[in-house]
């Protein structure tokens, strides 16, 4: 998969990708609006070119309160995110080119007020989804928000994702309608703070195409 070229779909105004992006931005804006006063820490896993978070931060009144780390493996996407952050004078944004699945990359930013897991759950196995959600309880502060995405194609894993978040101490804030053409959710962590487990790998990025062509891979 060419993950840089994949982002071109966002530029088609009424595509499902563009509509999902607008929804994710709305949930990011809501999380920033509702965050308590003071410094805000934000983590974005598999951040792509950062157009979800950076677009919101560029015009948000809390922009100077935010310290954010975007982790993205594709160097072209990471470079695009860095360029966008500089162009918007978002001095508190750091873009890291590397494996976003390693919790150690976020050690100095936890617990965070906002964790973005967008474009991840549709590309990893069920066990990876469960590990990642469990790790979100370590990455997120009590009262913090996780914004996530997952397609609604078969097998529809959105109900599983919601149940797993609930088991880990999260409360559902918002969920897109089943017929929206995409899945976007926001969960608030209501549990007690959990220590980060150094060395934890949350997932292996299998890819949507592999999971689609090999349904048995989803549960592996």
Image (cartoon, grey):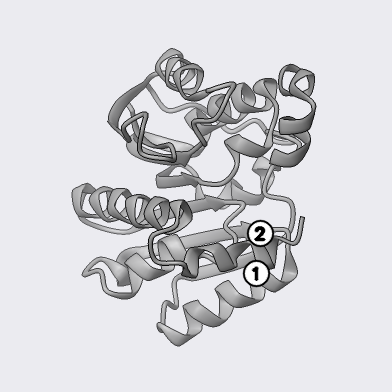
**Who comes first in sequence, dot 2 or dot 1?**
2
What residue lies at 37% left-to-right and 29% top-to-bottom? 178
> Are the residues tagged 2 and 1 within 8 Å (C-beta)?
yes
Q: Quadrant of the N terminus?
A: bottom right
* Above or below 132: residue 77: below
What residue lies at 50% left-to-right and 51% top-to-bottom? 43
The one nearer the camera, 41 or 174, is 174
Q: Is any part of residue 207 visible from this angle?
A: no
Say whether residue 127 is left or right of residue 150.
right
Q: Secondary structure at mark 1?
A: helix
Q: Quadrant of the C terminus?
A: top right
Say whether residue 186 is left or right of residue 82.
left
Say whether residue 38 is left or right of residue 209.
left
* Above or below 40: residue 135: above
Q: CA distance from mark 2 to mark 1?
A: 6 Å
The one nearer the camera, 19 or 137, is 19
What residue lies at 54% left-to-right and 30% top-to-bottom? 153
Q: Secondary structure at mark 2?
A: strand
What residue lies at 68% left-to-right and 27% top-to-bottom? 128
Q: Which mark is residue 78?
A: 1
Whole-percent x and y of residue 19? 37, 54
* Above or below 112: residue 98: below
Residue identifier under label 2: 72
Whole-percent x and y of residue 154? 58, 24
Q: Is any part of residue 89 visible from this angle?
A: yes
Whole-percent x and y of residue 196? 59, 33
Location of residue 199 (image quadrant): top right
């Amino acid at each position: 998969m060419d993950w840089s070229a994949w982002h071109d779909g966002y530029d088609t105004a009424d595509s499902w990708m563009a509509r999902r992006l607008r929804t994710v931005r709305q949930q990011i804006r809501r999380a920033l609006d509702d965050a308590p006063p003071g410094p805000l820490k934000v983590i974005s896993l598999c951040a792509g070119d950062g157009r979800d978070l950076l677009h919101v931060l560029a015009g948000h009144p809390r922009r100077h309160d935010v310290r954010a780390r975007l982790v993205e493996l594709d160097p072209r996407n990471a470079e695009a995110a860095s360029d966008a952050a500089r162009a918007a004078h978002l001095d508190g944004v750091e873009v890291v080119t590397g494996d976003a699945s390693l919790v150690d990359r976020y050690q100095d930013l936890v617990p965070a007020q906002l964790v973005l897991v967008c474009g991840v759950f549709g590309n990893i196995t069920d066990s990876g989804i469960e590990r990642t959600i469990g790790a979100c309880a370590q990455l997120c502060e009590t009262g913090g928000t996780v914004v996530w995405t997952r397609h609604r194609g078969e097998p529809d894993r959105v109900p599983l994702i919601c149940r797993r978040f609930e088991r880990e101490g999260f409360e559902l804030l918002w969920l897109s309608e089943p017929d929206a053409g995409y899945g976007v959710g926001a969960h608030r962590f209501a549990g007690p703070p959990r220590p980060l487990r150094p060395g934890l790998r949350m997932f292996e990025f299998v890819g949507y195409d592999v999971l689609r062509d090999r349904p048995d891979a989803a549960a592996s």
